[in-house]
Amino acid sequence: MTSIHLHRPKRSYAARVPGITCPHCDTRAIARDSVQADPLTRVIRFVCDNPECGHVFIAQLAIYRTLRPSAKPNPAIVLPLGQWRGKPANDDETPPANDDTPPAGEATTAPS
Ligand SMILES: [Zn+2]
């Protein structure tokens, strides 16, 4: 008797990088090659697909936040926990740019 549970064919994950467009002409750019700069960063060389533009540029693919912790953690890798499209961990929060409260002790006299 044959099993009715069919195994799905193993997915093949070809080496791909997320699409990016040329910042000058907004045409699709093609990843030509890449190097691993460190465990968290890959540097990619892109070539604009528009022959009238010809822009060649470097982009970085960086790992900067954990959504679900690894079951095989590398102690050398330290990443803040966060959410998809969410804010990073609270300790990464920066004060708002419009925080115009004067530092303590600063003179508040009007110019004469
Ligand atoms: Zn371009």
Image (tube, grey):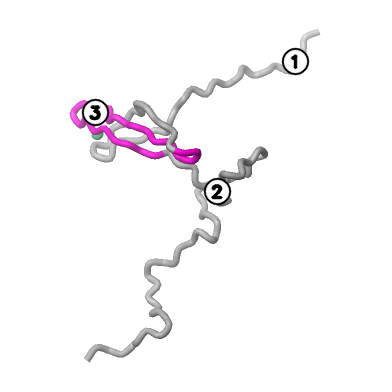
The number of numbered badges drawn on the structure is 3
Left or right placement of residue 2 versus residue 88 in this view: right
Residue drawn at (27%, 27%), measured in percent from left and top? 49
Q: Mark 2 against mark 3, which lies toward the viewer?
A: 2
Instruction: Describe the element under mark 1 as helix, strand or loop.
Output: loop
Q: Which residues are magenta?
A: 38-60
Q: Mark 1 against mark 2, which lies toward the viewer?
A: 2
- How far from the left and from the top, in percent, is residue 32? 34, 26
Quadrant hosting residue 74? top right
Instruction: Please identify the quadrant where the N terminus is shown.
Output: top right
Q: Nearer the viewer, residue 11 or 73?
A: 73
Left or right placement of residue 24 versus residue 65 in this view: left
Q: CA distance from mark 2 to mark 3?
A: 37 Å
Q: Main secondary structure of the magenta part?
A: strand
Instruction: Please identify the quadrant where the C terminus is shown.
Output: bottom left
Compared to residue 57, the image places residue 86 above or below, namely: below
Q: Disc 3 residue type?
A: Asn
Sort mark 3 into few (<14), some (14-19) or many (20+) by Cα contacts within 10 Å: some
Taking the magenta stretch, the answer to whether it contains residue 83 is no
Residue drawn at (54%, 20%), measured in percent from left and top? 12
Disc on res. 50: 3
- How far from the left and from the top, in percent, is residue 3? 77, 13
For marks 1 and 3, the one nearer the N-term is 1
Quadrant of ligand 1 in image: top left
Residue on which disc 1 sits: 4
Q: Residue furthest right?
A: 1
Residue on which disc 2 sits: 79
Q: Nearer the viewer, residue 62 or 77?
A: 77
